[in-house]
Each structure stands twice: as C-alpha cells, then as structure tokens.
C-alpha cells in the first residue's frame, strides 16, 4: 500500500484510478441500456502512413472499441509498473517514476496487442466488413436485454446472412407494447445506431427457423 501512495509510483497509481473510473462509467452505461464502448466505437486511422500507422496496426488499434483499448492499456501499465517497483523495493529501493515507466511501457505495448487480438475474437460485433447496419432491417431476432419499449434501448440478438451473431441496440416501435426478454422481434427500421423492433409474426419466425436449419447444397 505504501508503494501506491509513493511518488515513484504516481504514473501507475494515476493509471489505476483512471481505469477504475472508466470501468465504473462502462458498468453504469450498460445498466442504463447502452454501452460506452459501442457509443464511441473503434478508432480508425485510415489515410495515415509511415511508422505511426504501422505501430497502430501492430497494436491492433481498430480491432476493439476505444474505451476497451484504453482500459487494457491502463490496467497492464499499472500492474506492470507496480510489479517493477515492488521488485526494485525488495532488492534495493523504488526506481524514479520516469525510469520505471520506460520498461513498464515497453512491456505494456506487446501485451496490449495480444489482449486486443484475443478480445476482438470474442466480443460481439455490431458491424462487420461484410455486413452493413441497414442489412439487419427486415431480419428477426431475440430480445436479449429488455424489455424493449420506447424508452432506453435494449439489446436484440440477430444472426446475419453469414451466420454471425450480433447484439444490436433496439427500441420498440411507437405504439408497440413492451417486448420482453426472449421475445421474437422483427427489425423494421433504424434511427442512427438504434434499431426499431416490432413483435415478429409467427409465420415469419417459423420461416426463419426453417431457413437457419437448412444445409447449403
């Protein structure tokens, strides 16, 4: 605990406090029906070239939402920095903050790369390079976070034409009764990044179920 408050660990303590704050904001935003990570989205650096673009691509910037990337970097940097200072404290004395920050940063960069590559494979995607957002209009899905009404948006689990699942923000259409979790819905429109849903007709649901089980010839 004394290291956390020590001036030599100030960069790592600040990173840890920022991480705690961002985590709290992300949890609060999810409780309110949206995700800060998806609201901000993924960073893009198209049009840039040279060493910077190569480094950004190597770290996998753009593979995960920006808040997740920042939280990963802050967490790894803080943990690595405290570990370095702990070892230094046990062997002799804590290093100056700027000296300890250099190896901590050098370790953080490759670890962030590995972490983002793993997370990018498991985090649900709202969009892919092969699927446009408008392609989801007219598709059926299941309410996963709800109920859906005309207030704060919930979530609908939808399978795209390629068989990939997406968790889309959605609200019930005007005049539609609340759609509970597990309800089958039809996406009929989209306003910005929020889809408009109605209760799916039973014959359409049966048709979609049948097509999803058919094997390609």
Image (tube, rainbow, N blue to C red):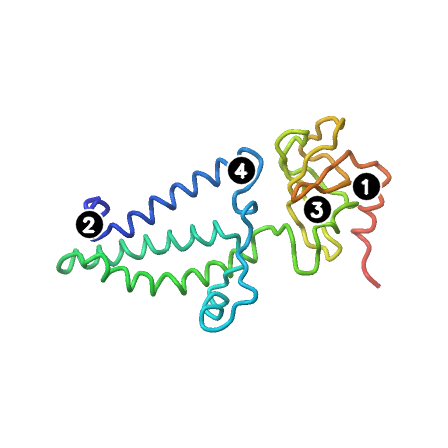
> Can you tell which quarter of the image residue 73 is in?
bottom left
User: Do tag 1 and tag 2 residues touch (Cβ < 8 Å)?
Assistant: no
**Is 112 above or below relative to 125?**
below
Residue 58: x %, y % from top left:
48, 68
Frontmost of labels 1 and 2 is: 2
Q: Which residue is mark 2?
A: 7
For the C terminus, which image quadrant? Answer: bottom right
Q: Which residue is mark 3?
A: 158
Residue 62: x %, y % from top left:
54, 59
User: Do tag 4 and tag 3 residues touch (Cβ < 8 Å)?
Assistant: no
- Relative to the observer, which residue lies in front, 41 or 147? 41
Nearer the N terminus, badge 1 or badge 2? Answer: 2
Q: Residues within 10 Å of mark 1 (few under 14, many from 20)?
A: some
Q: Is residue 62 left or right of residue 209?
A: left
Q: Is residue 61 left or right of residue 84?
A: right
Q: CA distance from mark 1 to mark 2?
A: 62 Å
For the N terminus, which image quadrant? Answer: top left
**Is 187 above or below relative to 8?**
above
Q: CA distance from mark 4 to mark 2?
A: 35 Å
Q: CA distance from mark 3 to mark 2?
A: 50 Å
Q: Residues within 10 Å of mark 2 (few under 14, many from 20)?
A: some
Q: CA distance from mark 4 to mark 1?
A: 29 Å
Frontmost of labels 4 and 3 is: 4
């Amino acid at each position: 605990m004394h290291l956390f408050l020590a001036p030599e660990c100030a960069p790592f303590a600040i990173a840890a406090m920022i991480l705690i704050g961002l985590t709290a904001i992300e949890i609060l935003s999810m409780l309110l029906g949206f995700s800060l990570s998806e609201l901000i989205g993924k960073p893009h650096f198209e049009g840039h070239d040279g060493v910077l673009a190569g480094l950004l691509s190597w770290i996998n910037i753009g593979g995960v939402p920006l808040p997740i990337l920042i939280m990963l970097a802050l967490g790894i940097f803080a943990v690595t920095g405290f570990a370095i200072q702990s070892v230094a404290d046990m062997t002799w004395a804590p290093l100056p903050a700027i000296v300890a920050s250099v190896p901590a940063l050098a370790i953080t960069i490759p670890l962030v790369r590995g972490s983002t590559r793993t997370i990018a494979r498991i985090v649900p995607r709202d969009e892919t390079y092969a699927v446009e957002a408008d392609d989801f209009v007219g598709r059926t899905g299941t309410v996963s976070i709800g109920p859906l009404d005309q207030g704060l948006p919930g979530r609908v689990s939808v399978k795209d034409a390629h068989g990939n699942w997406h968790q889309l923000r959605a609200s019930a259409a005007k005049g539609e009764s609340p759609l509970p979790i597990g309800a089958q819905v039809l996406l009929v429109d989209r306003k910005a990044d929020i889809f408009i849903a109605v209760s799916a007709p039973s014959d359409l649901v049966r048709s979609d179920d049948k097509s999803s089980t058919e094997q390609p010839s």
